[in-house]
Image (tube, helix red, strand yellow):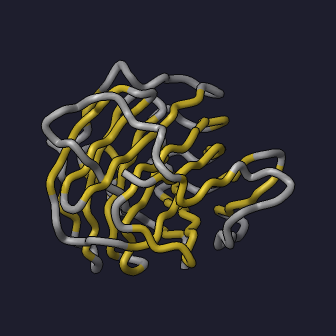
Amino acid sequence: MVWLRNIVVGAGLLMLLVVTGCRNLSSGGALSRDTEILFSEEFGESVSGAWQLEGDDQSRATIGDGHLLITIDAPSTVHYTTLPDQIFSNFVLEVDATQQAGSPSSSYGILLRMSGPQQFYRFEVTGNGEYVVERHDGAGSWVRLTDNWQSSEALVTGLNMTNRLAIVADGGMFSFYANDELLTQVVDAQYSQGAIALDAGTFGQPGLQVAFDNLVIRQP
């Protein structure tokens, strides 16, 4: 199942799922883009990956018009679409994410190192400029790896504004970026490899649309 209903809300914001990584925990330098490409996806006429596109009248994921679009028409709902046939361990991941409709408190982001549908890391941002990193261990078990939701001027806010999100995963070290600026770095060794997914979630208000494009995964 790739969508969830009635997600638990904490501190006024949705608590979701995750997957990804980081490197050079002490440096906080710029992202490197000169390493080998492991996977890329532009969501054009020819789609590279076998994405799990499922949905119903409340939420759905579709590919068209040059992007992957997640649409949610229900409150307190998360929908994610997985690339299940690709397993990644250490990597640098970048993707463009654009909120096209919905409340600015809605969220969107990346799940990484998914060892199962309920076991992963989650890097999530909101339309009003906040981010969080969490680990989901199944059965409603969440471990927050940042100090609650954090605000950052590196995140571009407002509808139809694109944020370039990035993750560097190297062993148990993770770095998280927005628009080439380092947001945070964490250390966690629970999951060493897994699939990736793209997700979006509503809190109190429905009507969310988030478009993803230009996904690239490189060697770290």
Q: Residue at x 22, y 65 (%)?
A: 142
The residue closer to the viewer here, 198 or 5, is 198
Q: Residue 170 appears at what percent x and percent y?
A: 27, 56
**Residue farthest to the top?**
153
The answer to whether residue 164 is visible is: yes
Judge from the rendering whether residue 130 lies leftward or rightward of residue 190; answer left or right.
right
Residue 141 x %, y %: 22, 71
The extreme right residue here reads 45
Q: Is 122 on the left or on the right of 135, as rendered?
A: right
Q: Position of residue 27 (x, y in %)?
A: 18, 33
Q: In the rendered view, would you say 116 is above or below 89?
A: below
Say which residue appears at 29% left-offset and 78% top-offset. 138
Return the residue nearer the eye: 183 or 27.
27
User: Residue at left 74%, top 52%?
Assistant: 43
The quadrant of the rendering that contains the N terminus is bottom right
Image mark count:
0
- Residue at point 35%, 26% (across, down): 181
Q: Nearest the camera: 69 or 30? A: 30
Report whether 73 appears left or right of 5: right
Residue 18 position, x and y percent, is: 36, 61
Vertical placement of residue 97 versus 218, above or below: above
Residue 209 visible in the current orientation = no
